[in-house]
Image: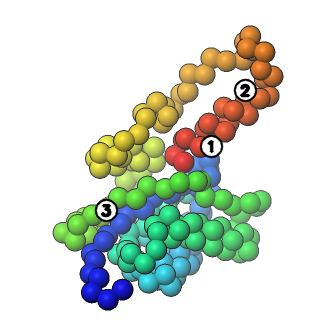
Amino acid sequence: MANTYTQLYIHFIFAVQNRTSLIQPDWEEELHKYITGIIQNKTHKMIAINSMPDHLHLFIEYQPNGAMSELIKVVKGESSKWIKNRGFVKGRFRWQEGYGAFSHSRSQIDRVYHYIQNQKEHHREKSFREEYLTLLKKFKIYFDENIFSRRLKICLISNKSGVPANTVIFNISRFLKLYLLG
């Protein structure tokens, strides 16, 4: 679009489904290069990318030529297929639904770049859950902290409700899938 000028720096975070530790050091660099290609083919600029076994960070200069959700959908879908086709994991690889997107100013580029590049050191002291909750709080993004509770106090299966136990369990697992990071 003519005469449209933007400066958008977005830090994305998303997790492997069920936060399973599937991203391995022997192929993570190839994954990073592949995802960088996807980002660049969509006309965005990759500033930093890094991962832990259970999640991934992207920091990009974002061009507003489409919805962020569509970009992440493409990144997740294409990278999942690539991981499967390369045989890096046994069975199916999937990213968890949802993502975090945090905007930054130009003056914060170096700080965010180094934060992402130092993920391995950072996570020696802080879990993914702690990191994610800290970012949500720092950016004042509303969320229900009970949803992120490590120990869900679900006192059920006395089953006096007349609902079959497998239905109750299905609903709990659906709740966990939908609301625990996404």
Residue 5, above or below 162: below
Q: Which mark is on residue 177?
A: 1
Label 3, secondary structure: give it: strand
Which residue appears at 56% of the width and 70% of the height? 75
Neighbour tally class for label 2: few under 14, some 14-19, many 20 plus, Cα within 10 Å: some
Picture coordinates of residue 8 (x, y %)?
Answer: 30, 71
Residue 7 falls in which quadrant of the image?
A: bottom left
First along the sequence among labels 1 and 3: 3
Residue 118, above or below 139: below
> Label 1, label 3: how many angstroms apart (C-alpha)?
26 Å
Relative depth, front residue between 14 and 49:
14
Quarter the N terminus occupies: bottom left
Label 2, secondary structure: give it: helix
Q: Which mark is on residue 103?
A: 3
Which residue appears at 71% of the width and 63% of the height? 89
Task: Give amino acid for label 3.
Answer: Ser
Neighbour tally class for label 1: few under 14, some 14-19, many 20 plus, Cα within 10 Å: some
Picture coordinates of residue 11 (x, y %)?
Answer: 37, 63
Task: Give amino acid for label 1.
Answer: Lys
Residue located beneath label 2 in the image? 168
Instruction: Say left or right for 126 vs 16.
Output: left
Which residue appears at 73% of the width and 14% of the height? 161
On the question of residue 176 being in view, the answer is: yes
Instruction: Say left or right for 7 vs 142.
Output: left
Which residue appears at 67% of the width and 18% of the height? 156
Picture coordinates of residue 103 (x, y %)?
Answer: 31, 62
Residue 179, above or below 86: above
Task: Give amino acid for label 2.
Answer: Val
